[in-house]
Amino acid sequence: MKLRKQVTVCGGAIFCVAVFSLYLMLDRVQHDPARRQNGGNFPRSQISVLQNRIEQLEQLLEENHQIISHIKDSVMELTDTGAVSPSGHLPFRSANGSWVLPFDGRPTFLAVKPQDCQFAVGSHGQADVQMLDVYSLLKFDNPDGGVWKQGFDITYDPDEWDNEPLQVFVVPHSHNDPGWIKTFDKYFTDQTQHILNNMVVKLPEDPRRKFIWSEISFFSKWWETADIHKQEAVRKLIHAGQLEIVTGGWVMTDEANVHYFAMIDQLIEGHQWLERNLGVTPRSGWAVDPFGHSATMPYLLKKANLTSMLIQRVHYSIKKHFASTRSLEFMWRQAWDTGSSTDIFCHMMPFYSYDVPHTCGPDPKICCQFDFKRLPGGRINCPWKVPPKTVVEANVAERAHLLLDQYRKKSKLYRSKVLLVPLGDDFRYDKALEWDQQYINYQKLFDYMNSHPEMHVQAQFGTLTDYFNAVYKTHGVAQGTRPADYPVLSGDFFAYADREDHYWTGYFTSRPFYKSLDRVIESHLRGAEILYSLAVANARHAGMEGRYPVSDYALLVDARRSVGLFQHHDAITGTAKENVVIDYGTKLLRSLIGLKRVIINAAHFLVMKNKEFYRFYQTEPFLETQDPGIICIPSHLSSPLPPPSVTPPPSCAHDCFFLLSARYLVLFNPIEQERLCVVTVLVNTVRVRVLTEDGQTLPVQLSAQWSSASQMSAEATFMVRLPPLGLAVFHLYDSPDSPMTLRSDTLLRLSGRGVAARSEHGMSCCYSNILSSLFLFSALSSLVCLLHPQSIKRKDDPQEVKVQMQFVVYGTRPSKDKSGAYLFLPDGKAKPYNQKEPPVVRVVEGPLFSEVVAHYQHFQQTIRIHNVPGVDGLSIDITTMVDIRDQTNKELAMRLVTDIQSGDVFYTDLNGFQMQPRRHYLKLPLQANFYPMPSQAYIQDSHHRLTLHTAQSLGVSSLESGQLEVIMDRRLMQDDNRGLGQGLKDNKKTANHFRLLLERRSTGNKEQALDFPSILSHMTNAILNHEVLALPVLPKRRGIPPLQTFAPLKSILPCDFHLLNLRSIQSQQDPHSPSPYTALILHRLALDCGQTHTWAHTLVEICLVEKLLQPMSLTLMHAGTPLANDSTISLDPMEISVFKLKLR
């Protein structure tokens, strides 16, 4: 006690001396006679003297912080022998052997209000066409339909148009893939720039010519290099209605693997570019090439104020069915919509492709003759051996009647006498000659048709919106309104097959490494957007905008565009050539580096206790970032090299192991709820201690960090409570052993070599390890022997659920058609994965987490449970590191086999936004029963629901009752004849990360028309997809200034609200700098309260804002009525709302 007092007194004395010397320095500066005589006008020599003094003062201040920091560390080391935890108790083992941890006692659960549960059980609007019912109805046979192979013979009465002539809109288009066979930049150089250069010359030649364009990624690149005359020509063409921008997203996004965060972000990026540069607001959606269509897309387009949309790649049997019932145009409604507020008018193209042979009518042999790029002498021709003919006076009548016959037949599939005929293909119109060939020949045909009243047709070039407006006008309804007797549809259009049993379900998994990387970068982008917006707002408020690196905004813009580019339907899908994939990856990694810089700079400013001490040095970052999940604390520069026996893991540098002096760690929680979770730090000592900001010691679990199956170093794991969207500061230092620092027990079974690494007992083939946590009990066979019964049991549930994990392998067909990047064509049912040697198995058991790791030849499986109150402790963490680079035509799948009586029904999510019920159909081939799983899939019966949450998009199915099966990776040696010209041979070692959640369903739960995740499921998804970002404070020679927790929310957001983004809006003057405004994007989650553990409430008060301006459309192009500053915002379940605001 005496020693403690002496140290405290000494420390206080040193502190007083330091402060007094600072005071004298300031006093001398203030009373400097030279300064007083000259007033504010200093000679240059005196200014430099003053600058030197200010620098000395800054140095003294920093040294003072270092002195105080050392005193604080010394006092902590001396006073902390009792190691008091937040609750005043020490960790201990209970009678059954499980760990009981000290806990601060604050609640981790909230109560749900009954009205929040009504949405899931309430009645919902009935659609005329439910896609699940259509699947049940159809035979999915494939009879020969004649000239329209996949359809039927179309007939018509020649007099049908006598009273109402057929209106034909021919819509010229060029489908530009931002990367596929060539990279984005190569396509632009070789083709796209020429298309747009020709467009501004050729369209003005005749005011009747029209053209549509979709991809803003290409258009913006062209605009940057276009001279002022070309830019002005574009504006005139748009104003005259000759050029229409359709959809207006950064890309034509994939709809299967993408997350709705990225779908929205790329749409905003495109629309914001259009608004700033062209003043254009898109009206119609155009999606001719995504491989299947999600119900999320119509919702987002509707929220962006588009009125109509078009889709193309839909299963040929569904197209045929819709054509036969004249349902190819419909109002697409969300399944949960109780009214019609989500309805959007949708046009489905009826035939095989969007190319010219498959767009004028049912007979491709005839339609190909009207693709004038294929005129004899060109580089492409018609496969049907009948070439096009130049239209001249001698043949115009015959040509016009032949084409009109196709137009009439196609129009018979629709309900109006208005016909849409796209005219284009991939990268068309790149030569001036083609513009002439198409436009001149078609204009001759139109002139002939229009000048012969007996043909009863009015044909012209048109834009997409010209067509939709004519449909609305014909039916006498407003734009976007449902015409009388048009069907209402709900559901989606997966899986897609273009012919025979060729189902495009392989791309749900193809190149999983990049699918995983995409989600990591999306999470970083969201985190960077939020922290940047908050930091800039704080800097403005403090009058320090000039000292903060506001220029980081350019890094955000670059990342938005790189992530947006990767949402393209040949990028995230894994269906581009190898060199193109590398180009996407390079762009993504460059963005990730930039985003980490944005996060570091924002966090640095926000955690400074006294902003006056904030200094930004580009070359000397205050913080660093580490990969999610593993946090390396680098040593001081003077640290010795690591001992030769220690092999650092590949994710960390050598100096990450050393913790020789006290270090600070900043943790960022990117989710909008308070978070109680475990964090892991690599250390070089087993004497590590972790303190909270207010000096309380946290329990620490020490365990081995395994760099291979049998080599290890040390890691420290501790439990933290983090504020929502906030930054918390922790203090780590090397100190004598503490009762709060506990070591893990590790058991290791090395194949053929007995037991090593502190093993106390031998392990038989079917070693059964019991992992136990506060909330969960899991008996796992540690994958050594799959015959051993395995189960999961919640401690609050008397019933045990059998869950067996198997690994199985699919081959591909021996016939001509084989699996490739797009197609999944298996050689029958999967075969069990086998290897000769039993796996190396490691079991780690400790107070904060326990895990089982099994090392197989082609994958390493880690199953971990956390002994943490709240969300983190209620699910099983599963990581599978897959490496199949030595395989040939094999696909590795993970299968969960349970005793849940799920029948043939399972549920998968669409884009992380909504759940879609699925049914396993025996009438369909095996590959047709796979669906995209961007974030989760579940099976359920009346007692339990088992959800597999995923951090990356993969293909999933349920092929038997009680099963869920995920394809982990695919290595395929050949092309599948869809234009790519390559197999999938560039596999990477890939970590697939999951959470397995078992929930008890209340027995009184009525059967619901719709299913939603529980609130626990929503929050499990959030913690999986938005991991805590660890930002170690780099050691500073002059010490660390005082830091403090940053918590931006003044009140807690309801836990059924998801803050999708807090996105700084671009300046209208400079696209690489921010305006004072920020877009707040909120999504209210819909809850299934049939799971007995949920919580939430209904309204959110925005407490961050200085001035809440107004509600906006999804992409900020349409403004709503401004709101008062103290407004309470109410959102319906499932609703996404956007607000433009100015942060405090």
Image (cartoon, rainbow, N blue to C red):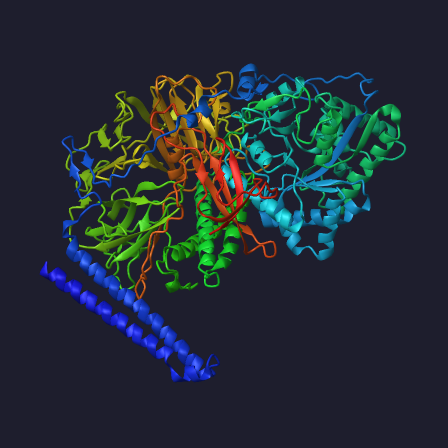
Q: Nearer the viewer, residue 240 or 26?
A: 26
Above-or-below relation of 267 to 5:
above
Q: Position of residue 559 (x, y in %)?
A: 51, 50
Place residue 436 in its image quadrant. Answer: top right
Place residue 386 in its image quadrant. Answer: top right
Left or right: where 106 falls relative to 325? left
Can the viewer see residue 326? yes
Place residue 978 in its image quadrant. Answer: top right
Which residue sits at x=44%, y=36%?
A: 1057
Left or right: where 974 falls relative to 624? right
Above-or-below relation of 739 to 872:
below
Q: Position of residue 1090 (x, y in %)?
A: 38, 23
Q: Nearer the viewer, residue 506 or 617?
A: 617
Left or right: where 952 falls relative to 255? left
Task: State the count of labels.
Answer: 0
Which residue sits at x=85%, y=24%?
A: 455
Left or right: where 624 falls relative to 394? left
Can the viewer see residue 218? no
Q: Nearer the viewer, residue 538 or 870?
A: 538
Which residue sits at x=19%, y=36%?
A: 99
Q: Position of residue 757 (x, y in %)?
A: 19, 42
Q: Nearer the viewer, residue 937 or 967?
A: 937
Which residue appears farthest toward the right when viewing the image?
394
Above-or-below relation of 151 to 662:
above
Quadrant the N terminus occupies? bottom left
Q: Position of residue 154 (x, y in %)?
A: 73, 18
